[in-house]
Amino acid sequence: MDYKPSGVSDETERNSSSSARKTTARSFDASSSSSASPGRSRTSGKKRQRSRILRADAGRFMIARLLALVCLVLVVFEGNVIYRLFSHRVGTNVEIMHSSNQAETEGILQSSADAGTAVSTRESTTTPAAPSTVSALAGGTLAGGGQDLITDVSESTASGTVDTQSPEYIDSPKVVRQQSKAVDDSYFNNAVFIGDSRMEGFRNASGITQGTFLTGVGLSIEDMDRQIISTAGGNISVYQGLSGQQYDKIYLMLGANDLGYYPWDMFLPQFKSVLERFHELQPKAIIYVCSVIYVEESKIAPGYEYDNNDNVRTINGYILQACEELWYSYYLNLNEIFSNGYGGLIQDASSDGIHLYPDYLAMMLDYLKTHYITDEEFEKARAANPDDIANAVPATEKSTEKSTEKLIEEVSAG
């Protein structure tokens, strides 16, 4: 039996018990609150650590982006260098005007030659281009003393003399000499000019008003049968351009783009094969082969050091040899007028060391007007090669000859 002290009611006992439980509960809550504080502290520390990691990752990502950007710039730069190397050799920028297809182009070239007008791979002009208005290869004025040089060339041409003491004089029967009389532009009416950017400069800025031009920037010896000359009717090759009509004269200026790419032991046979193909397509034409003009080495851009005058002299030796071995080819020694006297290009005749200013291109035109092979000389050379294709009688003429012989026999028999 439970004992209860006297004077203490059941309600009072219950109240006391309840107060004790509340006090215990508050103590537990306080204890719990106190023990939870370190947990919140650890959570806050983790957040700060994660923030530092994110900032570090962002920094590394930014560095990676910068490195990628640098790599991209290097790739673009190197790609531009490679593009320049290839475009220097094989890039082309040629158009034959007013042609919608190859057959139409050939017809226009023929009709233009009959009419005595100039046909160019671009629009030609009838007046010399002023130095200030020529955009492609111009941009400067004639170097000091240049005008005197032009006068000297004209006076030498008028006298018909040849300076055999000149350092550029070549003692070969295939080198074209000065004639006492200069021709006018009509001499080039039925001529075709084939060449690279230097020949394009001649077309654009020399003042020539006659002739057909098949030229391309970067054109080289091995490009003759490649369809890289752009026309309104599509791309054609140089060989296709020579198939449209018969020309009296072919002027060829190539070799500058072969200096750094062609093994010397392969150049001569390849060059001769080009001339032989030209002769097959144009058996009646004189082939004038221009020497590779000297360069001004101090102005040659980095990466193009193969454009030097030692290489120019070497390649010109092979070009002359090809002319000496082919009766229909003749060598135009342009360095007679463009040499500085020491085996290099006249100082300041070019902006880049290769492409000539307009005044010097006009000198080249004057040179061509005084350096040519007469009809009598060419016919004599042709007669000395009776088995050559140039002496072959066309089939129509053979038929006429047979008919005439048959008629004579019939008359004699009658």
Image (cartoon, grey):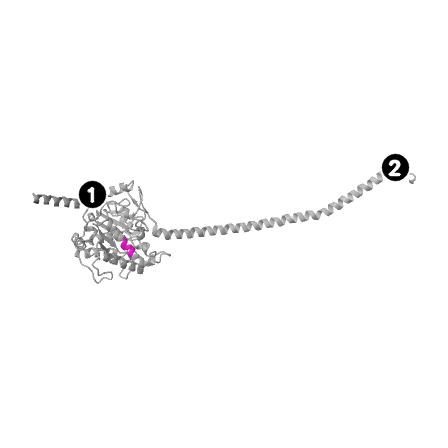
Of the numbered discs 1 and 2, the one sitting upstream in the chain is 2
**Residue at left offset 70%, top offset 49%:** 38
Question: Label for residue 114?
Answer: 1
Q: Would residue 28 be visible to someone looking at this image? A: yes
Q: For the residue labelled by badge 2, is the local secondary structure a helix, a strand or a loop?
A: helix
Q: Position of residue 344 (x, y in %)?
A: 29, 59
Q: Position of residue 355 (x, y in %)?
A: 30, 53
Q: Residues within 10 Å of mark 1 (few under 14, many from 20)?
A: few
**Residue at left offset 69%, top offset 47%:** 39
| In-front residue for pair 140/247 | 247
Question: Label for residue 187?
Answer: none
| In-front residue for pair 320/398 | 398
Q: Residues within 10 Å of mark 2 (few under 14, many from 20)?
A: few
The residue where tag 2 is placed is 10
Q: Which residues are magenta?
A: 269-273
Q: Position of residue 410 (x, y in %)?
A: 10, 43
CB under 8 Å between callouts 1 and 2? no
Q: For the residue labelled by badge 1, is the local secondary structure a helix, a strand or a loop?
A: helix
Does the stretch in magenta take in 386?
no
Query: Please, what is the three-letter code of the amino acid marked with disc 1?
Result: Asp
Q: Main secondary structure of the magenta part?
A: helix
Residue located farthest toward the bottom when viewing the structure as drawn:
165
Distance (Cα) linking label 1 and label 2: 142 Å
Quarter of the picture containing the C terminus is: top left
Q: Position of residue 349 (x, y in %)?
A: 29, 55
